[in-house]
Image (tube, rainbow, N blue to C red):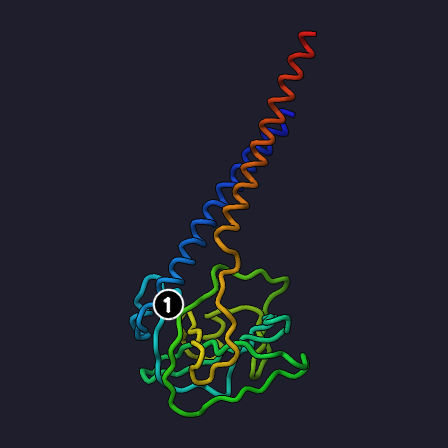
Amino acid sequence: MTLLVIAMLPVLVALGFWQLSRYEQKLMLEQAYESRHALDPFSLSQVQRHNDPLYLPFTVSGRFDRDRYFLLDNQVYQGEVGYELFMPFLTDGGEWLLVNRGWIVAGDREVLPKVVTDPGHLVLIGFAYKPLGKPFMLAEDVWEEGWPKRIQAFDSLKISEAIEHETADFFMVLRAGQPGVEQIRPMVINLKSEKHLGYAFQWFAMALALLLLYGFQMIRAGRNKLS
């Protein structure tokens, strides 16, 4: 019993503090999401100079590259499987930016969907976003030749290599009503901060239960020795 407590107690306590740290991180993200959406749009250069561009609103003008786009696979909306549509955008300043145009239905898995794109000069408004951490994948994300490309994860370096132009490490998520926007899925943080707080409580409760059980067993063993 003593060995079990020595082995398990530090693990349970460490998991509790880890969930507390995750709670603080998610709380900061939620606060940033709420506060930054109320700001007036920045320019692309201002966002690029920002230490943490996540959720910052900004505006760009230029044209979509209509012949090349990426389809992020396995994206579910209202119970239906589809793709997130990412398309390169050439700004008036000569910079390349990846734009998330929203969700589209997958349809036949053997045939990638065709996308209609405005060929004209556009002014877009959206906000900066990039995935937090590396996604879990069962196998390597191999991109086939040709366009469009069906991908399993956002990778700014691979995208830059594919379009042969350097892009930012974030992308623009279009606001509803913008030119070229598809179905906008509500932007939600995968796990609310309160969930992490609840998980932390569970780990600490398990640690306390283990200590109480150990104390009860020690008292019981002591009484047995006296008798």
Q: Picture coordinates of residue 43 (x, y %)?
A: 30, 75
Q: Which residue is mark 1?
A: 37
Q: Picture coordinates of residue 14 (x, y %)?
A: 51, 39
Quadrant of the rendering where the N terminus is positioned: top right
For the point 48% across and 52% down, the residue is: 193
Q: Is residue 13 above or below residue 161?
A: above
Q: Is residue 191 left or right of residue 179?
A: right
Q: Picture coordinates of residue 223 (x, y %)?
A: 66, 12
For the point 52% across and 56% down, the residue is: 191
Label 1 neighbourhood size at 10 Å, few (<14), some (14-19), many (20+)? some
Q: Is residue 72 above or below residue 52?
A: below
Please state which of residues 35 and 158 is positioned toward the viewer in this rendering.
Answer: 35
Q: Amino acid at mark 1?
A: His
Element assignment for label 1: loop
For the point 63% across and 62% down, the residue is: 138
For the point 67% across and 79% down, the residue is: 109
